[in-house]
Amino acid sequence: MFEIIILLRADLEVDEIGEYYESLSNGLGTKFFNEYQEYVETLHTFPFFEEKYNTVRTLPLKKFPYTIHFTVDEVNKIVTVYAVTSNYQNPNTTRIKL
């Protein structure tokens, strides 16, 4: 089992995305949050998804157009979630600072 650390930036992004979807349709924000939580739970046991930017790995959500960006410390068994970004953003202008 891996410990999950979610940085404040990622937490704030998830809250903002959830509020946005909730404003579109009652209950949609909850559906987003539940899917996000499900994927984070997956990282406890299997965090070895695509390595995208050097050591940063990505895990796209299935029902919502967002991707979780995280690193894996295999020695200490820690997954750190850095960001949750929209898949519609230009990858040339989106940078994750570690």
Image (tube, rainbow, N blue to C red):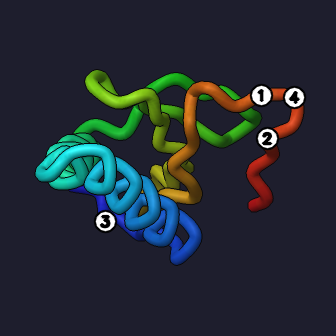
**Residue 87 at x, y = what percent?**
57, 27
**Labels 3 and 2: the sequence-earlier one:** 3
Distance from the alpha carbon under mark 3 to that under mark 1: 28 Å
Q: Amino acid at mark 1?
A: Pro
- Above-or-below relation of 24 to 11: above
Task: List the residue tagged with mark 2.
Answer: 94
Q: Quadrant of residue 78?
A: bottom left
Residues at discs 3 and 4 in contact (Cβ within 8 Å): no
Between tags 3 and 1, which lies in front?
Answer: 1
Q: Amino acid at mark 3?
A: Glu
Residues at discs 3 and 2 in contact (Cβ within 8 Å): no
Q: Residue at x 16, y 54 (%)?
A: 30
The answer to whether 33 appears left or right of 96 in the picture is left
Residues at discs 2 and 4 in contact (Cβ within 8 Å): yes
For disc 4, the neighbor class at 10 Å (few under 14, some 14 to 19, many from 20) is few
Task: List the residue tagged with mark 4.
Answer: 92
User: Quick one: 43 or 64, which is closer to the camera?
Assistant: 64
- Badge number at residue 3: 3
**Residue 10 at x, y = what percent?**
51, 63
For disc 1, the neighbor class at 10 Å (few under 14, some 14 to 19, many from 20) is few
**Labels 3 and 4: the sequence-earlier one:** 3
Q: Residue at x 87, y 28 (%)?
A: 92
**Labels 3 and 1: the sequence-earlier one:** 3
Task: List the residue tagged with mark 1.
Answer: 91
User: Quick one: 17 or 83, which is closer to the camera?
Assistant: 17
The answer to whether 13 appears left or right of 26 in the picture is right
Element on which disc 2 rests? loop
Residue that protrudes farthest toward the right in the picture: 92
For disc 3, the neighbor class at 10 Å (few under 14, some 14 to 19, many from 20) is some
Residues at discs 1 and 2 in contact (Cβ within 8 Å): yes
Distance from the alpha carbon under mark 3 to that under mark 2: 27 Å
